[in-house]
Image: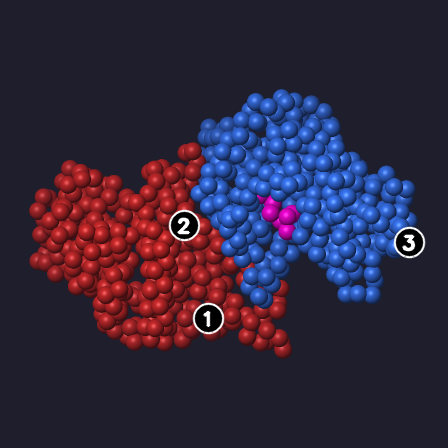
Amino acid sequence: MSPAPLSELRARADSLRQAVRDFHATVMPVDLRDKSHRHQVLSKDDYVRWMRLLDQQGWSVAHWPEEYGGKGWSPLERFAFEDELARLGCPWVIPFGVKYVGPVIYAFGSDAQKQRFLPGIKTTEEFWAQGYSEPGAGSDLAGLRTTAIRDGDHYVVNGQKVWTTYAQWADWLFCLVRTDKDDKPQSGISFLLIDMKSPGVKVVPIRTMDGYAHVNEVWLEDVKVPAENLIGEEGKGWTYAKFLLKNERTAGAIVGWAWHVLDRLKRHARESVVNGLPLIEQPLLRHRLGEFELRFLALELAAYQAVEAMCDGSESGSEASLIKIRGTELYQEVMETLVEALGAAGVACDVEALHSAGLPPLGPDDAGGILKDHFYNRAATIFGGSSEIQRNIVAKVVLGL
Amino acid sequence: MSTDLETIGMLRDSAARYADDNYSFHQRWSVLARPEGYSPQAWSDLAEFGFLALRLPEDDGGLDGDAVAVGAIMEIVGARLLMEPVLASAVVATGLLLKLGSASQKAALLPRLADGSLILAFADEDEAGNACVFDGSRLIGGKLGVLHGDVAGELLVSARDTAGAPVVLRVGADAAGVSRRGYRLVDGRGAARFSFDGAPAELLQPESGLSAAAALAETRDEAAVALCAESLGIVRKLVEITTDYLKVRKQFGRVIGSNQALQHRMVDCLLLQEEIRALTAAAQQALAGPAAERTRIVSGARAYVVHAARKVCNEAVQMHGGLGVTDELDVSHYFRRLMVNAALFGNRDVHFTRFTDAALAR
């Protein structure tokens, strides 16, 4: 089947955006919508509810091929979906199952693994976490040292993972482990699925500067993992990991998030009057807003250009990195400006208010949530391949340096 | 109306091939030495290829080329630093004439524009305190910075009538009452300043009834978009040249491109190139769209591209070290071309302000 022409993909993406807006306006439960509009901390229950809502719309795995329950969305539809959700200020689409491990399982897993895991990923019946980073293996992921030693019909896993988002809620961990120490770093790695209820798995929360613990250490001590939970072939884990990272780096949501905070900043600038003049009319802030608008325009257009290149196969390899580098840079700067413009309310952090439906001590209702997002997304230029790693990749792959 | 992709591909290929064969950096030195500031031979070659009739209607032997078609040529103009008045005459002034000229004015001028025998320049920037006024038959005032005004046979001059309404006039560059002072721009192209002291002038009056104000606004936007495409050509070349240099220049026993500091800066140049490409394409599409969005996208593109191209060029100079500032190296010629282009048809501040007002009014 030859790919659909771009004009048709664009039309499909536009109608998908409309469907997402309709869903947000009419289907999404009010409590979830309010919480996410105020950028409050969501519970596991909230997230599971959210992910199941998306599944009920047929969207949770729409980017998968049809034979596995997807709709075979093009990169453009996928981008439009994530972008529109983000612009509307919807909760995060937790990617570990639907975006990360799901595609690895249908691309490289056995039939038994597909039957066992894909349905639960689609419906978020089972919650997944990602066991990639280690204390000694961050950007240099191939330096990981967690070992898996084959012992009959199972592996024995020992080591430590870190920055594991929502490991405290996870039923399963997909994990990169070292099955061979003699080879060069990349070739001794395997891809294992680990049941979080297994004896020897310990989750230790890491408190971040927003006062919350989104991320964890996961300690693995003599954890027995059935050999049938190995994905593909032993020692080929790096190939699967790279395939996954490629999916991770198609992050479309950052453009929508940048739009969302810029929109919020403009609203604040229109509503706040200082010395008789709305902030938006004050020359210095207006100039900054103009620069942000301009950078957003460049980001948005370059993102479309990049995603359309992914659709027709003309991509150079820099596309996803461009979106991530520029998107996170802009997001962070706009957020910083918003927090600054909030004045006293921008430094009043009330963790209690973020957990309950309570209001922050001063400022607009979403002041606490803005601050939480500001803290959390300070890591946006670090996680999912830091800006430096992104530049390394582009230098090597595209420029040949 | 949009030019089909096949035609655009053909244009691009033939312009690139022509420049490869006839307009290498080495061959260009002789053009720089010429008193006209361009090569009359190359100009007639460009006419031969049909590039000067790019924007003309098909009935007049043209290609009816849209902004994308113009961009395809302008990219080559930028990449090869062509000195000929493609932008000033074939793109900007021809465009204004097509919008605002009467049938007889077009019949008189278009064939001469197509065959290259006439260079038509657009004189837009008023001399401070001496704005151009048209009394119904004669023109008084001064114009500055008219690109290729030094070699133009005729001018299209923006002015106001005695009631203060914008008008566009056709003026002979050597007519009585016109005094012209030609000079060289820093990139080697020619320009001129003009004083009009009761010079005979003919009003451009289209049968379509389009206002001069609207036509001028469209023309300035078209100039801005064509300059974006020229910048794209320049930036692509600079990224290519500089990346190649990083791979061969050795210091401390290794190629300088093995330094992460330089790799990352080079990547940032590539990102700027990709943004320029996306903005240019969007601005080309926006020219045919609704006015408010046209203003936002075109001025946004122009403001971003001026800044981004300058940044890339500064990096290209810096990474070439001392060589980067020599006359001998092409990089310094791109630097000077970008300097001139940044000052043409509304600079960055003008467009940035216009963009900001449009964006924040949404």
Measure how far apart labels 2 and 3 are at the Cα level. 59 Å
Residue plotted at (61% across, 69% down):
B258
Judged by depth in the image, the label closer to the viewer, 1 or 3, is 3
- Parent chain of label 1: B
Task: Look at the magenta stretch and give its main secondary structure.
Answer: helix
Same chain under badges 1 and 3? The reply is no
**Amino acid identity at mark 2:** Ala
Tag nearer the camera, 2 or 3:
3
Q: How is the image coloured?
A: by chain
**Which residue is label 3 attached to?**
A151
Q: Residue A111 at what x, y percent from top left?
A: 74, 45
In this picture, which residue range is highlighted in magenta?
Answer: A246-255
Q: Position of residue A302 (x, y in %)?
A: 49, 49
Q: Residues within 10 Å of mark 3 (few under 14, many from 20)?
A: few
- Assess whether residue A247 is covered by the magenta stretch: yes
**Which residue is the site of mark 1?**
B324
| Residue A196 percent across, percent down from the top left | 83, 40
Which amino acid, by three-letter code, is at mark 1? Gly
Asked whether the viewer can see residue B130, the reply is: no
Residue carrying label 2? B281
Determine whether label 2 and label 3 are within 8 Å by CB: no
Residue B63 as seen in the image, left or right of residue B230: left
- Residue A94 part of the magenta-drawn span: no
